[in-house]
Amino acid sequence: MKCFSRYLPYLFRPPSTLLSSSCHTEADIISTVEFNSTGELLATGDKGGRVVVFQREQESKNQPHRRGEYNVYSTFQSHEPEFDYLKSLEIEEKINKIRWLPQQNAAYFLLSTNDKTVKLWKISERDKRPEGYNLKDEDGRIRDPATITTLRVPVLQPMDLMVEATPRRVFSNAHTYHINSISVNSDYETFMSTDDLRINLWNLEITNRSFNIVDIKPANMEELTEVITAAEFHPHQCNTFVYSSSKGSIRLCDMRASALCDNHSKFFEEPEDPSNRSFFSEIISSISDVKFSHSGRYLMTRDYLTVKIWDLNMESKPLETYQVHDYLRSKLCSLYENDCIFDKFECVWNGSDSVIMTGSYNNFFRMFDRNTKRDVTLEASRENSKPRAILKPRKVCVGGKRRKDEISVDSLDFSKKIIHTAWHPSENIIAVAATNNLYIFQDKVN
């Protein structure tokens, strides 16, 4: 289990809380984490509408261990709070999702979304500035053309490196309900945005028009029985996408079949065990995240208590089921009362699809090795994440005598939760968001 039993931590905090370790506002809470396709950049979004981009340190011969460290590269305000006057609704600035586009030139591009609007951002570097304008003086003021007696050739002068973030496209006015996910297609020309009842397909070059490809809204809203919880494009087949529902089902759709994909190509759902039926069954079966494997062969879904791996060629039952925190099954009543049962945990694959990771409570996160069937629980906290210290596995004691290194299930802090995680596309480097802290752990380098 070397690939995830010897992680070293790094800790980052948003700019507004760098000076204070105990004080943070609601706006500082991290709401999404995403590596780009090379893993050189890592973006986080928060409830205040900000996007912070971290860049990986280049390798140094003098300090080879610094290779894994990430430093702040750019920070910008992606979304602002708005107000829908027609519906008398406030639109939060919170960043729900970030998705990177593949790098085509020196600049980087990413999509960020709040509840209603998706934006395409360009992040670029500038280390030269033009000087010697004819119609402007050195202060930027416009000169009187009558005073110009000679023409100058502007020149580019070196300057300190500046990273600029500029909005290139704004995709808006297409969603009645809250956007919960966005996904870039493998053709790199289109992307989809998903809300509770509809999925829209956009062209990255066209902002005033989108195509509705899934619509599950009933004619009578009183007949509504399920909502869409997440959606993602297939990593290699640009015509295929998948979406999950609050009823625990996953639908695979093929856009070649029809323009409106209300009829799915494949339907994945595990029959419920009647012996486990309870008042909370429908709530805990709701799928909070769905992810294709990098190979495109498998699907991973996360519900409240488990992570399931599905083979695209087998719809009848999941290939693998992993218990994330089964010790909470007896606590569902209190979790319902404090609304924790509605938390939407995400899940991620490692670069080779051999290990999966997802979050839990008490700032715990879980990893499962698909080959060895071994698992581990690790904790992301300031107390036990000193730089260069190796993380120790944690264990939860359900009942009986508690050992020294175990924590009782009754002592778990449900206000501390790992919802958002990300895994480097090719290396054992993970990013874990714990409230307003971002932890980056890397496999130990001997």
Image (cartoon, rainbow, N blue to C red):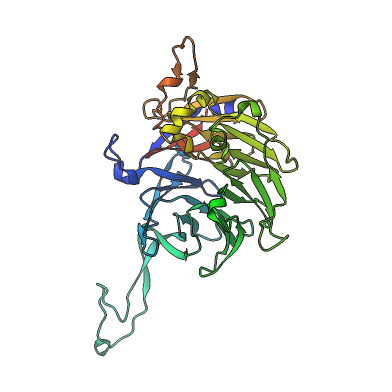
Rendered image quadrant of residue 211: bottom right
Residue under the point 50% across and 25% down:
328
Q: In this view, does 304 lie to the left or right of 239?
A: left
Q: Is residue 441 left or right of residue 281?
A: left
Q: Is residue 244 left or right of residue 28?
A: right
| Above or below: residue 44 compared with residue 337 | below
In depth, the one of 186 and 149 nearer the eye is 186
Residue 259 appears in the picture as rendered: yes
Q: Residue furthest bottom?
A: 146
Where, quadrant-wise, is the N terminus in this rendering? Answer: top right
| Above or below: residue 253 compared with residue 126 | above
Locate residue 401, reporting x and y percent. Answer: 47, 9
Locate residue 190, reporting x and y percent. Answer: 59, 61
Q: Which residue lies furthest to the right in this view?
A: 313
Q: Residue furthest top?
A: 401
Locate residue 420, reporting x and y percent. Answer: 48, 40
| Above or below: residue 121 compared with residue 402 | below
In depth, the one of 445 and 220 nearer the eye is 220
| Above or below: residue 9 compared with residue 202 | above
Locate residue 265, reporting x and y percent. Answer: 72, 51
